[in-house]
Amino acid sequence: MSRIQTVNIGVPRPNPAKSVGTTAIDRRPIDGPIYVRAPGPKGTGLGSGIVDDTVFDYAHHGGDDQAVYAYAREDLDAWELTLQRELTCGMFGENITTVGVDLTYAVIGQRWRVGEQVILEVSGPRKPCGTFAHWMNEDRWVKRFIAHGAPGAFLRVIEEGEIKPGDRVEVIHTPTHDVTIDLTFRALLVDPDLLSSLLEADALPESIKELARRRARISSRSTC
């Protein structure tokens, strides 16, 4: 059964990697239910979609399009073998650690029912940053993470409510296009020629759609 293994909230840590100076990338599992809600626009709202979670770099993290970050336990397990170190749930800064959910090939705009009330929508992949690299303390971490190709998924909150460890994750809607987390990640960070193919996915954040539109215009001019 597809389910949430843990729900994780951030512990503030010093962050020398960015001028903000503090990060909540160190997320730890909690017991019991916690409320999830849409946090509002990036930079102006509540930051995280998880009540009691924290976002410090409001310019780059949080907001409605990145309300909840999910990473699969199976992908953490694969990284454990590669890195030869233990990776606890929440270690990658994820708000929810899933089991039995194929995040890499989730379709943008796919909706999940989590537990009894909450509906989440797949919005895009995580892009690794300097804070993540500093936190992991692994050589060439950003390049290795990109090459590995399992970025996890950001989620919007469509219907708010409580979630808890063990809650079932049920896919209740999948759009008919083929734009997945994997395709979006590769288009953004590996092969920009793929960007124009992202325009099929209305549920992508506006910033990504604008990159796709620009690429489509360039491609159109080059073929004239």
Image: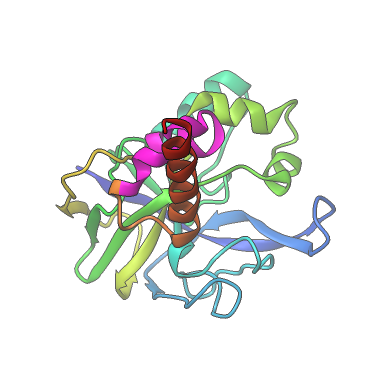
Q: Is residue 76 visible?
A: no
Q: Residue at x 55, y 69 (%)?
A: 53
Is 149 left or right of 85, judged from the image as shown?
A: left
Residue 123, relative to residue 190: is it above or below?
A: below
Q: Residue at x 16, y 45 (%)?
A: 176
Q: Is residue 187 magenta?
A: yes
Q: Position of residue 68 (x, y in %)?
A: 44, 60
Q: Position of residue 184 (x, y in %)?
A: 42, 40
Q: Is residue 112 visible?
A: yes
25 or 43: nearer the eye? 43
- Placement of the C terminus among the 4 image quadrants: top left
Q: Residue at x 65, y 28 (%)?
A: 143
For the record, the magenta segment spans: 182-199
Q: Position of residue 122 (x, y in %)?
A: 33, 53
Residue 8, relative to residue 157: is it above or below?
A: above
Residue 171, relative to residue 180: is it above or below?
A: below
